[in-house]
Image (cartoon, rainbow, N blue to C red):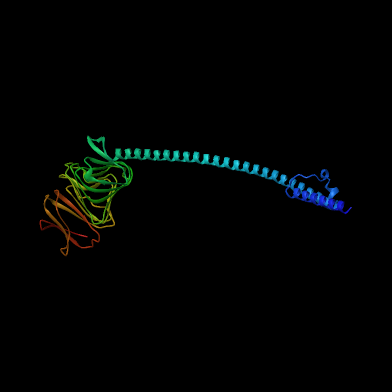
Amino acid sequence: MAKKTKKKKSEAKAALEEAVTAVTNKQPYNLESSGTHRDIGTPVYAKLRDLERLEANLTDQIEEDNRHMTKDLSRLEQAQTRVTDRLDHRSRLLRNTLVIVIGLVVILIGFMVWIAITLGGLSNQINQKQTATTNGVTLSVVEPSHDINLSEKDTDITLVEGGEYNLTGTTTHSINITVDDDVTLHLNNVNITSDAKTAINYTGDRQYALHLDLISNTKNTIISNGTDTQGGTLHSTGQIILEGEGSLDVYGAGTYGNGIKTSGAYFINGGKILNVGSDMIEKSAPSLQRSLSFDLSETVNSGSSVQVRNSQGTILKSFVAAQDFRTLVWSQPNLSDGAYNLFVNDKKIQTINL
C-alpha cells in the first residue's frame, strides 16, 4: 500500500512539472486530456486552469494589441502619404509661382528697357541736330530742364517748351524760344557772338516772361554782328527779367541796333548789367535795382576804352567796346544818389545824376 501511494505521488509530481513546464514555455497543454487532475489533485488542477486562462487572455490581448498597432501603422502610412502629396503639391505650386514671377520680372525689365530706348531715342531726336528749318536755317531743338553746352552746338538752337535751361559755353549761333510759357535761362559764363540780328529771341505770348538768371561770380556776354536796324541782341515779345549775382554785357548790332529790346518791358532785379546799343535808349522798367542811362550825341567806336565812374572817381565798370554804340545802361546793386560820369578813352563825355 505504501509503495502504491509513493508511486502515485511520483506520477503526480511528474505530471505537475510537465504542466508547469508547458505553461511556462507557452506550449499547448490540455489538462482535460492529460488526466492530470486525476493525478495531481483538485487544488493544483484549479491553479493550472487559472494559468491556462491567463495565458489565453494574454494571447488574446496580444493579438488585439497587434491588430490596433496594425491599424495605427496603416493610419500613419496614410497620413504620411497625404503629407507627402501636399508637400509635392505645394512644391509644384511654388515652382510654378516662381516661374511666373521670373517671367513677369523678365517682361517688366524688357518693358523698362523698351521705355528707356524709346525715351532715349526721343531725347536724341530732340537734342540732336534736326532737319527742321526756320527761314532756311537749320535748328537744334532742345528739351527743358536740361544742361546745354553751347560749345557743342553747330546750329541755331530752338527751345520749344517752357521751363529752365542751364547754359554754358561759347557759340556763334542764336537761341530761339518759341513757346507760350515762362522760360528761365541760367547763364554760367556764356559767350554768344551771333551773326543774326538777335542772339537770344523769345517770340512767345507777351503775357509770359523770359528770365535770365546770372550765376554768381560768372561773366556773360551777348553780342550781335547782324545788320538789321530793328532788332535787339536780346529780344522778347514779352517781359525780360534779369536777376542773379553774376554779370551780363549786351551789345546791340548795326547802326541802329539795340542791346536789349522788348515789346513789353525789362526789369533788372540783380546782377551787374551793361546794355549798349546804337538806337534810341530803352530804359529798364521800375526794378528792384537802380540803373544809369547815358544817351550820347556822338557814336562811341568799337575798340574804345570805356569807364563808368561815380563822383569820387571810383570805377564801377570798365570795358573795351565790342561794337559802336550811342546809348549805354549800367546797373549794379546799391547805386546811391549822386553824380555819375562816362569816360571814353579817359575823356569824360557825359555826367548824369540819380
Q: Quadrant of residue 351?
A: bottom left
Q: Nearer the viewer, residue 152 or 182?
A: 152
Q: Residue at position x 78%, y 45% from top?
A: 29
Q: Quadrant of residue 294?
A: bottom left
Q: Is residue 212 above or below residue 86?
A: below
Q: Position of residue 37 (x, y in %)?
A: 84, 48
Looking at the image, the residue that sits furthest to the bottom is 312
Q: Nearer the viewer, residue 273 or 62?
A: 62
Q: Position of residue 307 (x, y in %)?
A: 15, 57
Q: Quadrant of the C terminus?
A: bottom left
Q: Position of residue 60 (x, y in %)?
A: 75, 45
Q: Position of residue 103 (x, y in %)?
A: 44, 38
* 206 relative position to 72: left or right: left
Marks counted in the figure total 0
* 98 relative position to 292: left or right: right
Looking at the image, the residue that sits furthest to the right is 1
Q: Nearer the viewer, residue 154 or 38?
A: 38
* 344 relative position to 89: left or right: left
